[in-house]
Image (cartoon, rainbow, N blue to C red):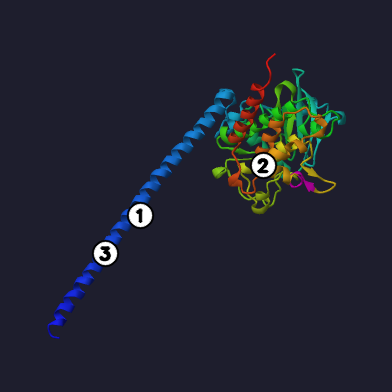
Amino acid sequence: MEFVFPYLFICIVFFLLFLVTMVHIAVVTSIAVVSSVATASIVCFKMFCRCKMALLGRCRAEVDSELGPAQACIGGDPEKGAAALRRFRWPEVESLTARFAPSAVIGEGGSSIVYLGRLPDSSFAAVKLNRPSERLRRAFRRELDVLRPLRHANVVRLLGYCDDREEQGVLVFEYVPEGSLHEQLHERGAALPWERRMEAALQVARALEYLHEGCDPPVVHGDVKAANVLLGGSTGAKLCDFGSASAGFSAAVAEPRRAMAVGSPGYVDPHYLRTGMVSKKSDVYSFGVLLLELVTGAEAFDAEREVRLTAAMGTLLREPGRKAAEEVDARLGGEYDAGEAAAAVAVAAMCLAENPALRPSMTEVVAFLRQKKAVRFSSKPST
């Protein structure tokens, strides 16, 4: 036995050394693996950032190249934007509107009245007079600050303003003669032709793309709906009413607005209703509702039945390819492009995703709509 113990002791020592060595190897290997993964992650993240910045740069370059230098969004200096605007005095505003004649009223809401005004050069203008209120005075200032740098063919142009009155602001816009998209879709006898509907969809999408990607800081409209799209014949569709718009926020996400409702029934983003957060993806959701409205001819919210269009068209949104033809506005009498209708509903379904992260950007929406429009025109028989 006295010879066994030394050998046993030596075996135990060697076994312990073996264990220590294996643990050391495992630790070193783990560190190497973790280091490799971390390095790879950093490299991938840097590549992702570069790709994203390059894509954003291309998007903004495309927007700027299409608009020209005069239409690029001006950021940072409010006085620079104000230099292009005319500041009207109160007597001038009274003269424009024939002293606010009731016969000159062309629109009216809870917060403002819009008059048809005549400028000194005999051209027409839309004169928006806010109702007297300190709250609406602040809203007027916010809207003016957002509007003054905007320059885009599909955004209604601000010509000037008047801030003479303590609690009553005035904004003077270009006049767009054919009324709103809501009026054309729902309040007039003849159905709006399919081609004009799809043109309006693309033009509104381009306006939102400009606000989101072509402006620095980006702008969120906050109330995209058919009533806030004006139709101007040769000038196309123009997005208007920036009373709910936001600009200058971090990462294009505004602060919670629980004290102030943003959006309109049927169009408002459910994510905003849950969180109070407004983002570019809120505009994307509202645009999806508008696109669905253009295809079906139905209103975004049926006040009588208290039913949202998105709820009524749940089956269509799940199966746009199969169900689109069944839900296209019957007033068109079959005068529409079936493939374009299915594609429009598919784009609407993406925009209406419950999770904002799954919704496309407006740049992607514009690309989808342009692609389908190009296919439609290329498939037309030559004459």
Secondary element under disc 1, as helix, strand or loop, is helix
| Residue sitting nearer the eye, 207 or 301 | 301
Q: Is residue 80 left or right of residue 3?
A: right
**Closer to the N terminus: mark 2 or mark 1?**
1
> Cβ–Cβ below 8 Å for labels 2 and 1?
no
Assign a secondary structure to mark 3: helix
Could you say which is closer to the camera, residue 269 or residue 293?
Answer: 293
Q: CA distance from mark 3 to mark 1?
A: 18 Å
**Could you tell which of marks 3 and 1 lies nearer the N-terminus?**
3
Q: Which residue is mark 1?
A: 34
Residue that carries the numbered disc 2 in the rendered image: 349
Quadrant location, the N terminus:
bottom left
Circle 2 SS class: helix
Q: CA distance from mark 3 to mark 2?
A: 56 Å
Nearest-to-viewer mark from 3 and 1: 3
Q: Amino acid at mark 1?
A: Val
Mark 3 and mark 1 in contact? Answer it, CB < 8 Å: no
Question: Would you name the residue on which mark 3 appears?
Answer: 22
How busy is the neighbourhood of tag 1: few (under 14 within 10 Å), some, or many (20 plus)? few
Q: Is residue 202 magenta?
A: no
Badge number at residue 332: none
Is residue 165 something one can see in this rendering?
Answer: no
Which residue is nearer to you in this view: 33 or 181?
33
Please give the range of residues in magenta. Answer: 307-312
Crowd around label 3: few <14 · some 14–19 · many ≥20 (10 Å): few
Q: Which x, y percent locates residue 158?
A: 68, 29
